Amino acid sequence: MAGGIGTARGEIITEQNIGSEIFIRGACMRLVAKFGQISLLLCLIWTLFGSFVAAAEGGYASIEITDWRVKWGDSAGTGSNAIPDTKEPGWIAADGAQGALELPDGASSAWTRVQLPQYSFTSPSVYIEKLYALHVRVYVEDRLVFEAGRGYIKDQYSLLVPLNTADAGKAMYIWTETLQDRIGVKDKIIIGEHSVLVKDYIRNGLIDVILGGAFIFVAIVLFVCSFYLNKEYFPIAATLAVVIASTGVLSVTYSPFIYTFYSYLGPASIIFYDIALLSLLPALTYLFERIFGGGKYGIIRKFRKFQAGYSLFCLICLVINLISGNRFVELYYFVSTTVVGVILILQFVLLIACVVLFALRRNRDAIIFAVGFGFAALTSVLELSWYYYREGDYDLFYWKWSLVVFILSLIIILGRRLALNHQQVVKYSRELELFNNELQRSEKMEIISELAASVAHEVRNPLQVTRGFLQLLSEKSSGDEKSYLTMALSELDRAASIITDFLTFAKPEFEQISLLNVQDEFKHIESILRPLCHLTGGKMVVEVGDQLWVRGNSSKFKQAFINIIKNSIESLGDDGVIQMSAYAKGDKVYIHIKDNGEGMDHDVLGRLGEPYFSNKTKGTGLGLMVTFRIIEAMRGEIRFISKKGAGTESVTVLPRADNPEASDSQS
């Protein structure tokens, strides 16, 4: 018994732990969802803000310049400030539709001549959204108005150069130098009011920083929350945090905002960009592997190991290049950009093919993953293909927005899995609670059973002897003495009845088992209890179908249902009605006993069948306890439905037996 009680306590403690785990998981899911909503809201607000600003600026008549002239140079004249004469040969026409020009062989610099229009701006400025170079100088006629240089490979500039009102109609010269294959102005040059252009200048790339910062913040929160998950979901949540954080770092470090306003952070930004990209690729494949498995022939697992090895190789090359002072920058650029781009395309194609196969199998996670990842992969493949087709003369833009959709799909998958696991834990918790209740009930029943088996017989014999002598004395007594003896005999009979219930509970097995016709049994029960029902002012309605057969002991069957019906009779008020019905459904017989008595509260209903629990003044609770044991011995079950003031209904389900008459006719 001590071991049983210890087990019950252990189960209860486990249930409390499960409740805490449910609360923590729910809090983590709500927290991640809330931060996702905040990130989307910030993006939406920024987009709307940009639309409003654009609408407000519609009244400013900025001037766009889309054509200019270009003259190629080389590194020999880098230190010279001499502006070439426009009459010198070698000047070629260019326009924004061509995009950035490709450097011819032997050239590493270029002069761009732009004819400024006539304008009447109060504070004029020239704004160039995209200009490709590592070193830049801007002149108006022969006056130097801007100069900048970079010692790292990030060739995209965004320039806002103030002008004078007297510069209208003059020529502007832009000297650019690079180590890459593209150079010069990408598409257009804008002349306008400085107060107007500065907004575009500041806003260029800022949304990337906001989006990336939101991703990094969500990744940190998700990573912290992942420690509260179980071992099964920790790798998925932690890897998802790495994917989101890497995407955020890529968005921030790829943005021109950092290199425009915080140029001194350029070298560190490039390093973080490479580390984020090299972390994203194997993490993404590992996340896919954790969700859907290693794939046929372990192709996903093998590809992930290859990616991890190649990412480690690139990191080693990065360290060597940094230690050597960028002496191997071209080699590192090839292995970390060109080759990684090809691997990225192969990865997306492979994962798209796998996710389509899983989606065709109607895997819901695969369908969600297919929508998000398919959108991101298709966008990235198209952009990368276009990037290589233009030989680098293209700035990747749509990839970060496609990754937003993909990350949302990953969060949905993780949230869905946590929700399903949460439901399973809740279901297990409820089953555990029922098990605890059943365990406690079984322990109580075992105690009563052992007590009944060991004591009942020994107590019954002296009671019978005592009753016999009291009955003899009662026959010879008169007056008050006789009434006292009659009362004593009544209490002895009540004690004998309790002992009988004890014995029935201790040994519910039936000595004689036979086929019972439920209709006949209820006719006998009705004849016994109808007078008692009439005495209380109630009535009984019996609707029991014929040919309903069960296996059991007739006297025990009657005892069980008499206990139930007597309780219903005692709960009746004026115009009380007890309805008894029975019917067959499949291989079961259903017996309903319903009254319109006073009913019971939920707390009382849950304790029915417990020993020594009763609503009656002189009740012991043994009657229903015996009823439960008899029904259990017949391999059936019984449940009660009740509401305070609305009556009580008992539903008993017993195994249906074959009709003996049908068996005889077949034989």
Image: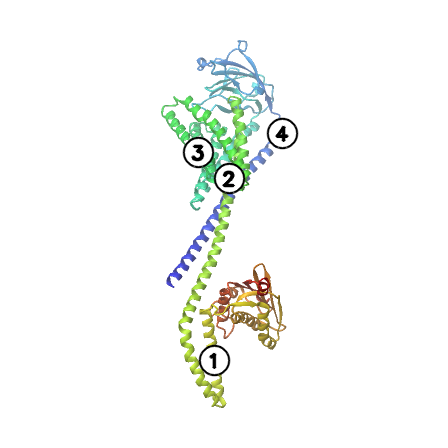
- The tag on residue 491 is 1
Residue at image mark 4? 58
Residue 651, percent across and down? 56, 64
Q: Nearer the viewer, mark 3 or mark 4?
A: 3
Which mark is first along the chain, 1 or 3?
3
Query: What is the three-letter code of the residue carrying label 4?
Result: Gly
CB atoms of marks 1 and 4 within 8 Å: no
Q: Secondary structure at mark 1?
A: helix
Residue 3, percent across and down? 37, 61
* Residue count near mark 2 (Cα–Cα under 10 Å), binned few <14, some 14–19, many ≥20: many
Residue 300 visible in the shown view: no
Q: Mark 3 and mark 4: span between their CA atoms?
A: 51 Å
Query: What is the three-letter code of the residue carrying label 3?
Result: Arg
- The tag on residue 410 is 2
Q: Mark 2 and mark 1: span between their CA atoms?
A: 74 Å
Which mark is first along the chain, 1 or 2?
2
Camera-side residue of 352 and 119 = 352
Which mark is first along the chain, 2 or 3?
3
Query: What is the three-letter code of the residue carrying label 2?
Result: Leu
Residue at image mark 3? 304
| Residue at screen point 48% across, 26% down | 342
